[in-house]
Image: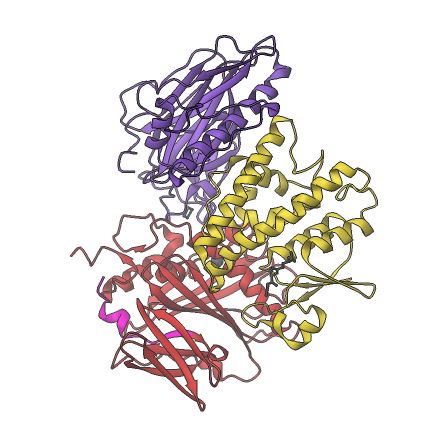
Chain colours: A yellow, B purple, C red
Amino acid sequence: MKLYDYVLSGNCYKIRLLVRFLEIECEIVAVDFYPGREHKSAAFLGINPLGQIPVLEDDGLVIRDAQAILLYLANKYDGHGRWWPSGDPRLVGEVTMWLVFADRITATSSAARMHDVLGYDLDVGAARAGARSVFRVLEDHLTDREFGGHEWIAGPAPTIADIACFPYTALAHDGGIDLSPWPAIRRWLRRFTNLPGFFTMPGIDHIRR
Amino acid sequence: MEEASLSSWTAVGLSAAVSPGTACRALVGDHDLVIWRGRDRQVRVWENRCPHRGMRLSYGFVRGDRLTCCYHGWTYDGEGACTLIPARPDLAPPKAVRIGQYARAEHAGIIWAASGSIGMEAPSFPGDWIGCRSIAIDRPREEVDSHFASGRFILSHPDQHGEINRIACAPSLNGDGVHRIELHDSHLFEAVLCAGQPVSGTQTMLHVSVRPRGAAGKHGEALRHVSDWLKEVRTLVENRRAGIRTLGVPRARLPHILERDHGPG
Amino acid sequence: MALDEFTRSHWYAIGRLEDVPDGGSRSTRLLGHDVVAERRAEALSIRLKADGAPLKAQERYGHVWTTLHDDPRPLYDIPEFEEKGRRLVTAGCVSVRCSGLRAVENFLDLAHFPFVHAGILGVEEQATVEQYEVEPDRNEDELWATSCKFYQPRAAATAESGQVTHYKYRVPHPFSTILYKTCPIRDDAWDLIGLFIQPVEEDLSDVHSFVLVFDEDNSDTDLLHFQQTIFLQDRFILENQVPRLLPLVPGSETPTRADASSIAYRRWLRKKGLTYGALPAIRAA
Ligand SMILES: N[C@@H](CCC(=O)N[C@@H](CS)C(=O)NCC(=O)O)C(=O)O
Ligand code: FES
Ligand SMILES: [Fe+2]
């Protein structure tokens, strides 16, 4: 198994986290995303015509999109069905809903970060405003979950929905978004960093402390 | 936000949100605060700046009853005196190093802070309160306050027969952003306390506690009820200026708060 | 804030060579001015956007350089760029909301390794910074910190185990700094890592960095990822230091003996009359 990876990518980090949580072996192929834009090279477009990372290769199968890869890995390698509780239709619905939601976090919080860190030319005001409204939805959800005695986004234990939503929430400040208005989010981030096997990426080390 | 000088007691967080061993950040206008709690359960509110090289202490970590800065590990005791410089453990930390402190108090499940020289006792609220939630509203505190004062917020609540009653919120206790709503016939709670933190000219954090009625097993229901109400309060306050009409919540879903029938005026 | 003469008199990197390919251009900002670099028929030209006034240009150390000054001081030499067998990786530019001076000071600092780069460049159990020397060179044009050493669990992309790493630091320019560290595979050589900082505004910096090393095991991309990992860890700190500008007034922060390079750097900046990206001291006077 092979992951096309960039150390500063939150989407790639999702995959590395699940690989660690499931204790499976995966070769990391370092992609020069920045400044080299290797993901837009002809060779890489042959692997993913969308020109995006992460991409996973396993047994001749090539999968792109972080959430799709999470689903694939959990289905294939999580014998206990913990990370993807496929036996429970309600949970399948909820987890999928938050997997899709994770892409909204990418579209807003990650965009703001690309602008602030790597100088991407985009409307950072709109990206931050979008991130704030997305975080508000997550905050309200996690607050409700806590009233019911629950610690995770869906179900009684962490799922790939938590993994999918974690990185670009934890990295929000890289894009100039301070998380102090959302205390339930901050509690959830801290819980996540306490999962067995958790490791950090640059820019989120402070959450653990 | 010129007024947010912390010259009066200001809510800066829920007690439960700063659990022992954690630190977090709160903004009150130009004041950048770190709030942290040691294993001794004492909460501290300090200037959010390490005297060594200016790093925000809210990203530091709490060990025992000390706060450690995440940049070079300078460690401070509960009084804000430096006790350790890891790069030079042989060195007695300079005595002059002391972090700016704010007066702080915990009442009604809420952490209150004021500038160090305040001569007044923190507001206290009798009874057993439980922190419900903190909610960010993207409007200045004056605006949130004026909504409370107008009696426009209606809190609905069921009595013991399951009948829905509605109560209009009372004006601020003393114009300091603290609003207490007493409910005599509610089945779920006796009172709700909303305390506004003026974060900036565009944002207020409302820290909300509840005095629940009945068995502890029912508290979750009371908290969720108030939290849902707060979401509607937020929508009402934020949408008013934008000229968006607030939609009524369907009856079937146990309405919490609606603007009064005659609308936002 | 008027630009001080010392800051104005220097050359600044404004992009990698690859960022200005033939037929291409790069718009950026330097010391509060919009500038455009472009290359036509192999020739590099740089101008101010506002009035089209041409600026001096040169290509060195993998980067494109310019200056706002008509008679700038010469760009400093880095002789190691001529050495055979070294590999150059330019890591691109990372923006940071802080004065470039804060970024230089952070780069010179050993004491943060165990906390900010825990498990890579330091461990908390061995956080002691031994005494080292810091001195300006003879003309006071440069600052050097020498005989620095520090225990590191994973000093470079190449390193598999811990070692005591020896360092030298060089500040040849108020907004540039280079470190020389023990090369894990060659006893007689130093590996270089450096920052060329482009002050966009007083409190906003584009940080260009490079790695110039002897390394036979890692791909360029591995070296790049390592360098970016370290710098993004620093970036979090730099964005959270208050104030964003570097205080040059003695007494506004608390240096100790472990901060010898910071003390010397600030003293050198004061002496040179630098105000851009710094807090009062000279400004008030
Ligand atoms: N929906 C995709 C988004 C992936 C994505 O945005 N990847 C970024 C790097 S983190 C990328 O490759 N961006 C380049 C592009 O979109 O052109 C996923 O979740 O994997
Ligand atoms: S800035 Fe806090 S320890 Fe150095
Ligand atoms: Fe560093």
- B245 with respect to C249 (left or right): right
**Could you tell me which residue is drawn at 52 percent across and 46 percent down?**
A206
**Could you tell me which residue is drawn at 58 percent across and 57 percent down?**
C120
In terms of depth relative to the viewer, which is nearer, B152 or C98?
A: B152
Report if residue B66 lies within the magenta region. no
Specify start and end residues of the magenta stretch as a single range: C1-14
Q: Position of residue C43 (x, y in %)?
A: 41, 89
In terms of depth relative to the viewer, which is nearer, A9 or A46?
A: A46
- A25 with respect to B51 (left or right): right
Q: Position of residue B126 (x, y in %)?
A: 43, 11
Report if residue C3 lies within the magenta region. yes
Q: Is residue B65 visible?
A: no
In terms of depth relative to the viewer, which is nearer, C123 or B112?
A: B112
Q: Is residue C88 above or below residue A2?
A: below
Image quarter for residue B107? top left
Q: Position of residue B171 (x, y in %)?
A: 35, 19
Q: Position of residue A171 (x, y in %)?
A: 54, 50
Q: Is residue A38 above or below residue C266?
A: below
